[in-house]
Image (cartoon, rainbow, N blue to C red):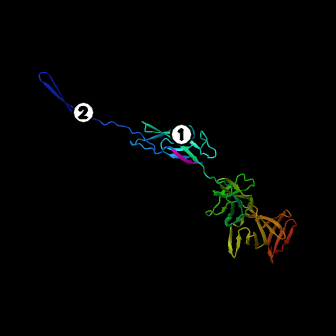
C-alpha cells in the first residue's frame, strides 16, 4: 500500500512524502477436530474400543490423552494413534463402570500442541451369546509296531465338548508316573476326529506308557493310560551276510535262518529261540537244554542256566548236535524237534 503526505504552511509552502506499507502474513492456527460424536458401542469380552482419527487442517501431528471421567481408570489411550482400549476385557454380566449400567464414561483430548479439543465418551457394552463348552473326551488306541524301530500311536476324539479342538496328541513316558514325559502333537486330517503320531529311537525290550490328550477353549483332557513294550534288539544280527533264501551268516555264530517271531533254524543247534541280553550277548532256548547264554568271543561255549555250568558245541553229526557237558564231564547228544 502507498500513501502520500503533504505538509503546508501559511505561505503555501509545502513538502510531500510517500509512505509504502507492506502487509505480511501471520499464521493463524486451526484447531483439530474429532470424527466421532463420542457415542460408542463395543462387545463384551474384548479390549479394543475405537481408534480416533482426528483431523487437523494445518497438518500438525496430533497427540491424544485421557482427561478425566468416572471410568477413566479402566481405559488406555495410545498417545500417537488414538486407539482407545479397555485395560482388561469387560463382562456384561459383571459391569465395572461407576454406576454399573454397562455404560462407561470417560473424557479424552486431542491436541496440536496449541489448541486442545476434548470429547466426552459414552462407551456402551453389549451382551454376547456365550456358548458353554466342556473339555473334550479322548481315547487312546492300541500301539502298532512298524518297521525300522518305529511305533505308531493312534487316538480318537470321542466328543469335542461343543468347542473346536485346538490341539490333540500323545504323552509318552518310560516310568508310569509320567515324571519326564515326551509330548507329541498328533497329525489330523482336516477336522478329522482321529489323530496319530510315530515314535522312534525308543529303548528296546522296554515298557512304555502313553495317553492321548486334546484341548479346546475349556481346557485339556487326557485319556486313560495304556502300555506297550518295544521289541528286543536284534543287533546281534547286524553284522551278518545274506546267503540267499532268507539265510544269514554271522562271523561268530555261523549260518542260520531267522523268523519274524525270534525263532531261528541254526546250522548246528537246529531250532532255537533267540533273545538279546541287552548288551553283547544272546540267550538261546532249545527244547532239551532250555536257556543257554553265549556271545561273540565265547561261542561255541554255552552257559547253561539250568545247571549253572558250561557246555561246548562240538559239531552236528547225522542231524544231531553234539555237546561236551562240563558238569557231567562227557559228550552229550541233543535231538532238535520243531518248535
Residue 301 occupies quadrant: bottom right
Q: In the structure shown, which secondary structural element does the residue marked by tag 2 occupy?
A: loop
* Magenta stretch in the rendered image: 39-43
How far across and how far down the image is residue 281, in percent?
Answer: 75, 63
Q: Nearer the viewer, residue 236 or 38?
A: 38
The image shows residue 90, relative to residue 189, as above or below, that is: above
Tell me whether the residue at label 2 lies in contact with that at label 1, contact meaning CB atoms closer than 8 angstroms. no
Q: Check disc 1 and report its element: helix, strand or loop.
A: strand
Classify 299 as above or below 5. Answer: below
Q: Residue at x 75, y 53 (%)?
A: 177
Name, please, the residue furthest toward the top: 10
User: Residue furthest toward the right?
Assistant: 328
Q: Earlier in the sequence, mark 2 or mark 1?
A: 2
The residue tagged 2 is 21
**Disc on res. 106:** 1
Residue 190: quadrant of the picture: bottom right
Q: CA distance from mark 2 to mark 1?
A: 52 Å
Q: Residue 243, can we see it?
A: yes
Q: Position of residue 189 (x, y in %)?
A: 62, 64
Q: Position of residue 75 (x, y in %)?
A: 55, 41
Amino acid at each position: 500500500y502507498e500513501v502520500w503526505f503533504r505538509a503546508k504552511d501559511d505561505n503555501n509552502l509545502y513538502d510531500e512524502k510517500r509512505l509504502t506499507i507492506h502487509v505480511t502474513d501471520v499464521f493463524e492456527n486451526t484447531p483439530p477436530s474429532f470424527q466421532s460424536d463420542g457415542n460408542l458401542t463395543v462387545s463384551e469380552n474384548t479390549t479394543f474400543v475405537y481408534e480416533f482419527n482426528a483431523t487437523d487442517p494445518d497438518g500438525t501431528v496430533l497427540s491424544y490423552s485421557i482427561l478425566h471421567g468416572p471410568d477413566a481408570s479402566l481405559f488406555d489411550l495410545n498417545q500417537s494413534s488414538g486407539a482407545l482400549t479397555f485395560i482388561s476385557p469387560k463382562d456384561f454380566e459383571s459391569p465395572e463402570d461407576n454406576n454399573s449400567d454397562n455404560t462407561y464414561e470417560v473424557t479424552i483430548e486431542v491436541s496440536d500442541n496449541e489448541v486442545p479439543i476434548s470429547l466426552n465418551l459414552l462407551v456402551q457394552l453389549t451382551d454376547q451369546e456365550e456358548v458353554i463348552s466342556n473339555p473334550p473326551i479322548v481315547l487312546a488306541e492300541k500301539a502298532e509296531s512298524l518297521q525300522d524301530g518305529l511305533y505308531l500311536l493312534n487316538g480318537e476324539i470321542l466328543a469335542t465338548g461343543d468347542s473346536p479342538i485346538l490341539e490333540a496328541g500323545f504323552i509318552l513316558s518310560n516310568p508310569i508316573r509320567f515324571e519326564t514325559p515326551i509330548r507329541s502333537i498328533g497329525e489330523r486330517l482336516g477336522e478329522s476326529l482321529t489323530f496319530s503320531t510315530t515314535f522312534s529311537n525308543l529303548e528296546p525290550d522296554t515298557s512304555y506308557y502313553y495317553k492321548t490328550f486334546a484341548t479346546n477353549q475349556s481346557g485339556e483332557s487326557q485319556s486313560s493310560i495304556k502300555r506297550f513294550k518295544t521289541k528286543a534288539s536284534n543287533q546281534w544280527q547286524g553284522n551278518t551276510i545274506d546267503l540267499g533264501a532268507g539265510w544269514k551268516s554271522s562271523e561268530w555264530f555261523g549260518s542260520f535262518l531267522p523268523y519274524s517271531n525270534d525263532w531261528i533254524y541254526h546250522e548246528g543247534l537246529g531250532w532255537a529261540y533267540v533273545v538279546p541280553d541287552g548288551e553283547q550277548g544272546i540267550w538261546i532256548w532249545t527244547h532239551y537244554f532250555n536257556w543257554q547264554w553265549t556271545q561273540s568271543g565265547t561261542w561255541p561255549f554255552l552257559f547253561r542256566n539250568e545247571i549253572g555250568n558250561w557246555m561246548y558245541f562240538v559239531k552236528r553229526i547225522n542231524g544231531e548236535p553234539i555237546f561236551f557237558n562240563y558238569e557231567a564231564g562227557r559228550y552229550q547228544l541233543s535231538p532238535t524237534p520243531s518248535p
